[in-house]
Image: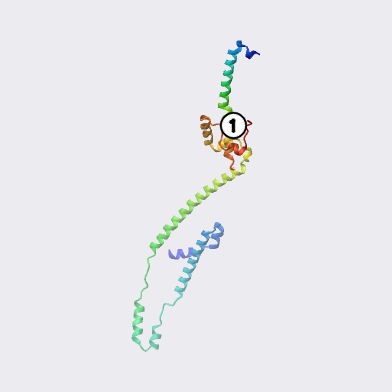
């Protein structure tokens, strides 16, 4: 199991943080606002 | 000008006014009231014109013993002068009123036409509108640009949920 081999720890931490930041960025800029738009418009165009 | 006014007043076709302009409600009733007033004034004028304005004093001198009374009344009759009214001021007022009324009517017509245009546009909008379940987010934003700003604000504040949404549309949260 390479993730338990200390030689790969630095690599894992680096790419772990890198992909996490990319995911956070994409969600906060594109995906979550898109769903928020859908929710708000749904609430807006319905009455009861 | 009185004769001209009378002849023009005679020409008014009251039935045609109501039918051709498509008047309804208060306008018709006030027009009818005015017509009634007009008819009454015409009748009054006609009756007054047909009343006798001469007195046969010779006949009364023959019939009555008291000649002095007859003389006195005749003198009064001859010295009577009908009061004359200066109606030019009233006519001027009427003219001014008419001009104002026409102006108002034209303004109203313009307003009504504009309203009709607006209503026509609204009607077209309604007829060409898609049902709600086919609306897209962009359509709603086009109609209400302020929503977009509101959403931006919410994103900035990190508010990702809409209060009341789950109650209305059901929660999609699994855990």
Q: Secondary structure at mark 1?
A: helix
Of residue A27 and residue B139, the one placed in the foreground of this image is: A27
Q: Residue furthest top?
A: A7
Quarter-of-image position of residue B92: bottom left
The scheme the figure's colours follow is rainbow
Residue located at (46% from left, 75% from top): B50
Of residue B48 and residue B143, the one placed in the foreground of this image is: B143
Seen in the picture, residue B127 relative to A19 is either above or below; the reply is: below
Quarter-of-image position of residue B131: top right
Q: How many marks?
A: 1
Of residue B118 and residue B45, the one placed in the foreground of this image is: B118
| Picture coordinates of residue B54, whole percent (x, y) | 41, 79
* Image quarter in which the N terminus of chain B is found: bottom left
Q: Residue furthest bottom?
A: B65
Crowding around mark 1 (Cα neighbors within 10 Å: few <14, some 14 to 19, many 20+) is few
Subunit that carries the residue with mark 1: A
| Picture coordinates of residue B155, whole percent (x, y) | 53, 30
| Picture coordinates of residue A12, whole percent (x, y) | 60, 15
Q: Residue furthest right?
A: A1
Residue located at (56% from left, 24% from top): A24
Indicate left or right for B21 with B90 as reference: right
Residue located at (35% from left, 78% from top): B78
Q: Tell me the residue that label 1 is attached to.
A: A35
Quarter-of-image position of residue B22: bottom right
Indicate left or right for B173 with B9 as reference: right
Residue located at (48% from left, 66% from top): B37
């Amino acid at each position: 199991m390479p993730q338990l081999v200390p030689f790969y720890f630095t690599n894992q931490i680096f790419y772990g943080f890198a992909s996490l930041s990319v995911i956070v960025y994409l969600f906060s800029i594109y995906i979550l606002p898109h769903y928020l738009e859908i929710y708000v418009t749904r609430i807006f165009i319905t009455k009861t | 000008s009185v004769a001209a006014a009378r002849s023009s007043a005679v020409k008014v076709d009251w039935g045609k006014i109501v039918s051709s302009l498509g008047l309804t409600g208060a306008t018709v009733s006030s027009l009818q009231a005015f017509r009634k007033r007009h008819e009454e004034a015409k009748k009054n004028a006609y009756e007054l014109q047909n009343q006798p304005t001469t007195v046969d004093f010779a006949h009364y001198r023959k019939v009555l013993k008291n000649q002095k009374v007859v003389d006195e009344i005749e003198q009064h009759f001859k010295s009577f002068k009908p009061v004359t009214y200066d109606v030019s001021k009233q006519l001027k007022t009427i003219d001014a009123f008419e001009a104002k009324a026409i102006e108002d009517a034209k303004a109203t017509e313009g307003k009504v036409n504009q309203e009709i245009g607006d209503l026509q546009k609204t009607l077209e909008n309604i007829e060409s509108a898609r049902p709600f379940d086919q609306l897209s987010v962009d359509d709603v934003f086009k109609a209400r640009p302020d929503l977009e700003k509101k959403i931006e604000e919410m994103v900035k504040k990190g508010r990702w949920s809409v209060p009341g949404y789950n109650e209305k549309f059901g929660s999609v949260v699994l855990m």
